[in-house]
Image (cartoon, rainbow, N blue to C red):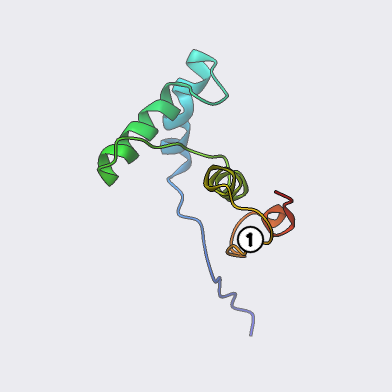
């Protein structure tokens, strides 16, 4: 059997479409958080979910860490293993 069966596979636009989408990032030279595309995406997600407040995170580790801190949880906190590898070893 030489046929590979992927459990998951990323959904990707065409190379040309991707280059067109990221062109504004290079044009405005804003490569970090809170840039125009970040803000646009955050607004679209907020509208889609019908919520007033939303925060985007780089990865699941940061999102879980902030949620745990905001909720004031202490001690052992069990989270999903399907996130960034460091999440299962976080010390809160």
Closest to the observer, 67 or 10: 67
User: The residue tagged with tag 1: helix, strand or loop?
Assistant: loop
Q: Tell me the residue at 57%/40% (across/down).
A: 58
Closest to the observer, 36 or 5: 36
Horizontal side, residue 54 vs residue 74: left or right:
left
Closest to the observer, 23 or 79: 79
Q: How many marks?
A: 1
**Residue 6 position in % (x across, y down):** 56, 70
Is residue 77 placed above or below 57 in the rendered structure? Answer: below
- Label 1, residues with CA under 10 Å away: few <14, some 14-19, many ≥20: few
**Residue 63 position in % (x across, y down):** 55, 45
Q: Quadrant for the N terminus, please.
A: bottom right
Q: Tell me the residue at 53%/39% (across/down).
A: 57
**Residue 12 position in % (x across, y down):** 46, 49
Horizontal side, residue 40 vs residue 89: left or right:
left
Horizontal side, residue 22 vs residue 65: left or right:
left
Q: Tell me the residue at 36%/28% (across/down).
A: 40
Q: Which residue bears the numbered disc 1?
A: 77
Is residue 62 placed above or below 34 in the rendered structure? Answer: below
The residue lying furthest to the top in this view is: 28
Q: Tell me the residue at 53%/42% (across/down).
A: 70
């Amino acid at each position: 059997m030489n046929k590979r069966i992927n459990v998951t596979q990323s959904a990707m636009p065409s190379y040309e479409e991707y280059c067109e989408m990221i062109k504004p990032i290079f044009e405005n030279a804003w490569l970090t958080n809170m840039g125009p595309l970040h803000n646009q995406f955050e607004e679209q997600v907020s509208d889609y979910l019908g919520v007033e407040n939303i925060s985007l995170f780089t990865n699941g580790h940061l999102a879980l860490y902030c949620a745990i801190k905001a909720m004031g949880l202490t001690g052992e906190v069990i989270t999903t293993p399907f996130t960034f590898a460091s999440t299962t070893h976080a010390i809160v």
